[in-house]
Image (cartoon, grey):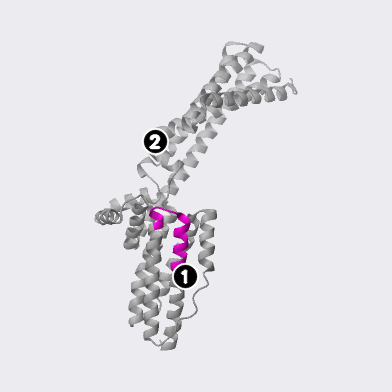
């Protein structure tokens, strides 16, 4: 490479590093205090050192520094981080850092500039890993709470699905039999319609739960497989990513590095840590599609059977009154149980379910009465 061409390329590198340093400083201001700020300031200082190295090399080659970047990009990204949250900006910058790392590896050869480029390239790869952790590693708020509370594990999830399945079966079948009863047909027809709705609804619920849960499990397994491939292909980058995740958890720089060094001795242990800390997944709790389908189907059957009880023992208007009365009590109980997962008032949730059930019953009964047979 001719000296003039080399100087021109190094001038571009210098401008990129100066701009990157300014961007990380703005982002550090945007995120406030904490580990994210410390990581961003470290990257700012690294980029400033890169710029200084290129400045020195340009002078050695007899070149001059170009005009400094305007700073609009740093201001824009800092404002965007405040407006939309910094995670989106981190994801954008991860792509930029990966592109910069690739650029440093092109055509530099074994010259002094090439040696500097290779050293800078390693730092840029670390920055890309850190930005990936910053953009994907923060799982606070609701997700953190769900991760800590024991009833949101496998058993808790099953209980939730059962309650919602009972609720669906109860409301849909109550509406169905009320609409048929409004048409003034015999008890046998009402029961037949109710049982048909029970069976079709249960099959539909079970199939839907199986398919959605299977899809969810396949997505999780694909994420784990992708993480395994990345670990095998770029182990050093994944180590830096894990280091950044531990820093974000509040580990000191020394403790985070020690933990990562320990995990690096066992690839499977490191993969498990990446899956849990980066992706927020726990393979042992991946949902079982067959179990989810069975739970949803059985829960729907239980809920659907409740409105039919009145028609098993009574006839005429007495059957309808008994069915609605039993269903209203069941709706209140189901609504109250839902608050185990929503955290709302059990009384308010129970009454809300009663209102929905009574409203659906009244509407379908009125519609059915328009078609008396």
Image coordinates for residue 100, horizontal then vertical, percent: 43, 70
Q: In the rendered structure, are the residues bearing label 1 and label 2 in contact, judged by CB atoms less than 8 Å apart?
A: no
Q: Residue at x 75, y 23 (%)?
A: 370
What residue is pinned by disc 1? Answer: 19
- Secondary structure beneath disc 1? helix
Kindly tell me whether residue 196 is visible in this rendering. Answer: no
Of residue 247 and residue 335, the one placed in the foreground of this image is 247
Q: Is residue 255 above or below residue 336?
A: below
Of residue 207 and residue 345, the one placed in the foreground of this image is 345
Image coordinates for residue 152, horizontal then vertical, percent: 41, 35
**Magenta extent:** 20-37
Marker count (numbered)? 2
Q: Residue at x 40, y 83 (%)?
A: 58
The reply, left or right, for residue 330 in relation to residue 367 is left
Q: In this view, does 33 lie above or below 94?
A: above
Of residue 206 and residue 243, the one placed in the foreground of this image is 243
Task: Specify whether residue 305 is painted magenta.
Answer: no
Image coordinates for residue 25, horizontal then vertical, percent: 44, 63
């Amino acid at each position: 490479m001719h000296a003039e061409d080399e100087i021109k390329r190094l001038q571009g590198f210098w401008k990129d590093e100066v701009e990157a340093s300014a961007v990380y400083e703005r982002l550090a201001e945007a995120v406030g205090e904490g580990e994210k700020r410390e990581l961003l300031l470290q990257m700012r200082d690294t980029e400033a050192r890169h710029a200084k190295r290129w400045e020195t090399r340009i002078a050695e080659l007899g070149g001059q520094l170009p005009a400094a970047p305007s700073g609009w990009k740093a201001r824009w990204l800092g404002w965007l981080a405040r407006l939309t949250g910094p995670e989106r900006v981190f994801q954008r910058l991860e792509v930029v850092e990966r592109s910069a790392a690739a650029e440093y590896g092109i055509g530099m050869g074994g010259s002094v500039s090439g040696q500097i480029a290779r050293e800078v390239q390693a730092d840029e790869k670390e920055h890309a890993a850190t930005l990936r952790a910053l953009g994907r590693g923060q799982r606070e708020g609701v997700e953190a709470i769900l991760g800590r509370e024991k009833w949101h594990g496998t058993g808790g999830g099953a209980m939730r699905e059962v309650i919602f399945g009972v609720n669906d079966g109860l409301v849909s079948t109550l509406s169905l039999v009320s609409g048929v009863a409004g048409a003034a047909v015999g008890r046998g027809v009402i029961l037949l319609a109710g049982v048909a709705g029970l069976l079709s609804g249960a099959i539909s619920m079970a199939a839907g739960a199986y398919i959605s849960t299977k899809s969810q499990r396949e997505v999780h397994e694909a994420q784990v497989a992708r993480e395994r491939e990345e670990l095998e292909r770029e182990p050093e980058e994944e180590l830096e990513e894990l280091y950044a995740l531990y820093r974000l958890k509040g580990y000191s720089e020394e403790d985070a590095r020690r933990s990562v060094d320990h995990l690096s001795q066992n690839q499977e242990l490191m993969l498990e840590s990446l899956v849990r800390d980066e992706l927020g997944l726990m393979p042992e709790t991946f949902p079982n599609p067959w179990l989810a389908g069975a739970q949803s189907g059985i829960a729907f059957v239980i809920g659907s059977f409740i409105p039919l009880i009145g028609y098993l023992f009574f006839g005429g208007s007495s059957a309808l009154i008994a069915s609605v009365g039993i269903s209203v009590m069941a709706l209140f109980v189901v609504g109250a149980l839902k608050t185990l997962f929503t955290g709302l008032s059990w009384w308010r949730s129970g009454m809300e379910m009663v209102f929905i059930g009574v409203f659906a019953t009244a509407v379908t009964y009125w519609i059915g009465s328009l078609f008396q047979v």
